[in-house]
Amino acid sequence: MPIEHTHVFSTAEHTWTVSRLWELAEGLPIEVIPIKGIQHLDEMMWETHMNLQMFVNHAIRVDDANLWYPILIHPNGWVMDGYHRIAKAMKLGLESILAVRFVEEPEPDQEE
């Protein structure tokens, strides 16, 4: 999957570069999962307030999201990459989305 920007996925203990997660996910099976089963969709996502330009930028990224690329799921069920694709699927009223689920936690790029 082409990464248009650099970003990371972090837990309290580990950080992963998303482009590296995609390399690690190569060859893993793609499955169709129900959107309602995705963890944490009802939790606050941003700790800071967005201005209008930031909001518009996110809306553009949702509109541009390619649903043919699966989202990446941590073995514990967390979304490691793909919130814009999930948002687009929800916006379109879809009930499921493509996903790749790691069986084991990938080696982190950085440990906290």
Image (tube, rainbow, N blue to C red):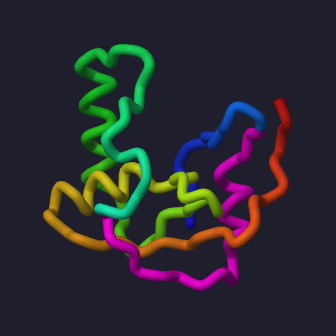
Is residue 52 toward the left or the right of residue 20 in the image?
A: left
Is 49 positioned to the left or the right of 111 in the image? left
Q: Quadrant of residue 5?
A: top right
User: In which quarter of the view is residue 20 placed?
Assistant: bottom right
* Residue occupying image coordinates x 20% and y 69%: 94
Q: In this image, 8 relative to 60: left or right?
A: right
Question: Where residue 101 appears, x then y in whole percent?
Answer: 59, 70
Looking at the figure, which quarter contains the N terminus? bottom right
Instruction: In this rendered view, identify the residue nearer to me: 109 or 106.
Output: 106
- Which part of the image, by quadrant, shows the C terminus? top right
Q: Residue at x 32, y 37 (%)?
A: 58
- Residue at point 42%, 75% (across, down): 98
Number of disc labels: 0
Tell me, yes or no, whether the highlighted magenta stretch contains residue 19.
yes
Query: Going by the picture, which residue comes out furthest to the left?
Result: 93
The residue that appears at 40% across and 59% down in the rendered structure is 38
Rendered position, 44 above or below 14 = above
Q: Which residues are magenta?
A: 14-35
Residue 100 in percent (x, y) is at 56, 73
Of 102 and 59, nearer the camera is: 102
| Percent position of residue 48, x then y | 41, 15
Left or right of residue 41: residue 93? left
82 to 109, vertically: above or below: below
Q: Position of residue 62 (x, y in %)?
A: 30, 49
Report if residue 8 lies within the magenta region: no
